[in-house]
Amino acid sequence: MSNKLLVSTRKGLFTLGQSAPHQWNIQSSAFLGDSVTLAIVDPRSGHSYAALNHGHFGVKLHRKTNVKPDWHEISTPTYPDFPDEREPDRCPMRGIEIPWKLELIWALVPGGADQPGRLWCGTLPGGLFRSDDHGDNWTLVQSLWDVPERAKWMGGGYDYPGIHSICVDPRNSSHITVAISCGGVWETTDDGASWSLIGQGLRNDYLPPDQAFDPVAQDPHIMVQCPSSPDHLWIQHHNGIFKSVDGGKSFAEIQEAGPSVFGFAAAVHPQNPDTAWFVPAIKDEQRIPVNGKLVVTRTRDGGESFEALSEGLPQTHAYDLVYRHALAIDESGHQLAMGSTTGNLWTTKNHGDIWTIASSTLPPIHSVSYF
Amino acid sequence: MPKVSFTSNLRRHVDCPEQVVAASTVAEALDLVFSQHPRLKGYVLDDQGSLHRHMAILVNGQAIRDRKQFAQPVEDHDEIFIMQALSGG
């Protein structure tokens, strides 16, 4: 089982370790005062990566390695020069200009085991980037940026579209599936040379009825892939929970899932694709736990039924929201960790049956990952 | 020669000493500074070469409006100050 956690927050990055079976302690911190939007450890190289958003000073990417164990800045993904005489891209819904520059690093994912230096990076305003040298250099995946359907991509939670989910098929590193808010689910089977819009069955109920099933108009909040059954994908969508058993080509909507089907986070058991977790909230604008009771919903039968897990979680006046990257599961499938907008961090060692608070004093939590 | 200086908030992230540069425009001044401190460029300009949305450049205390070309002329003893465009409390 993993015994360390990287917790990215609005005010720094924290590394937690286990001092006792149910006790997690902050062992180190970095970038105190700065907004860390994502952090991961690449299990292939052991390198750590942290994405920062300085606001005034832009988006930065830092790395540390066994050879250089202090965090140091590396290059960030850079959009190519805006073409002369091209009209600016505009959001199809609001008409606002979509910037042609890096706004946020929203996904950072290692490539396959056969691609040692490969990293994938999803960004706002919708560019997917690739590195083959552990982040020293980045290239925009022009083939996805140039799909005509990008004209229909639009902002969801942010003003601009963005790629938050990148799933690399463990059976075939050239098969990558990404989810875009808002732009649907896209797949490549040739390592990014060409892309197909998939995701039939996803439904966006805030659109006019005749557009609700348009695959490019979908607002997935997060998409997760079962490593042992990669054709099984779960999506926590703005409109609810969806499941695919055919690699994302089609999805079935889950109509009932405890207090609410709305939320941001999702996790799937690494060995059992029918077991998945979600953190429900009141749809749409309120985005707080239903009745002030924080629960995690869990299905063990592929979405046929859900349990609301509450032991160890606050059941009165809880206003925690769990962002899309702030629910993590380790490779064993026993441990999960969850961080909230109010700086609470919980862990469980028993699939969510019982949660234990690890910290209640952290800054607002953006993401959580095991290593 | 014009003097270029930076908000102290930047020094937490990147080396940016005050400098006097042989430049006749803000663009030339920035180019000279960035050539000596390459990391600094990404903290001031975005990846398209424009001033970051919430940054400002002042020449002798007046914010310049050209946020991309930086063509404004500068003369000896002018002071170019690069700062955060702070607002609110």
Image: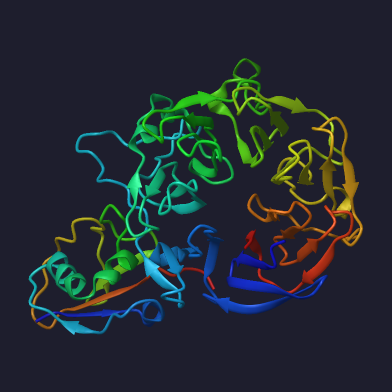
Image height of B4 relative to B86, above or below: below
Residue A284, by quadrant, is: top right
Which residue sits at x=75%, y=66%?
A: A344
For residue B21, what is the image quadrant? bottom left
The front one of B85 and A51 is A51
Residue A297 percent across, percent down from the top left: 83, 45
- Image side of residue A334 versus residue A108, left or right: right
Q: Taking the image as drawn, is residue A325 in sight?
A: yes
Q: Nearer the viewer, residue A13 or A183?
A: A13
In percent of the image, x 68 and y 77: which residue is there? A26
Q: Nearer the viewer, residue A201 or A181?
A: A201
- Residue A6, above or below A332: below
In the rendered image, the quadrant that contains the N terminus of chain A is bottom right
Identify which residue, A261 or A71, lies in the foreground: A71
Res. A181 visible in picture: no
Residue A322 position, x and y percent, is: 71, 54
Residue A88 position within the rendered picture, expressed as x and y whole percent measured from the top left: 32, 37
User: Where does residue A225 sit, x and y in percent of width and height?
Assistant: 64, 39
Look at the picture and state if A154 lies above or below B70. Answer: above
Figure check: A346 above or below A87: below
- Specify the farthest residue to the top: A210
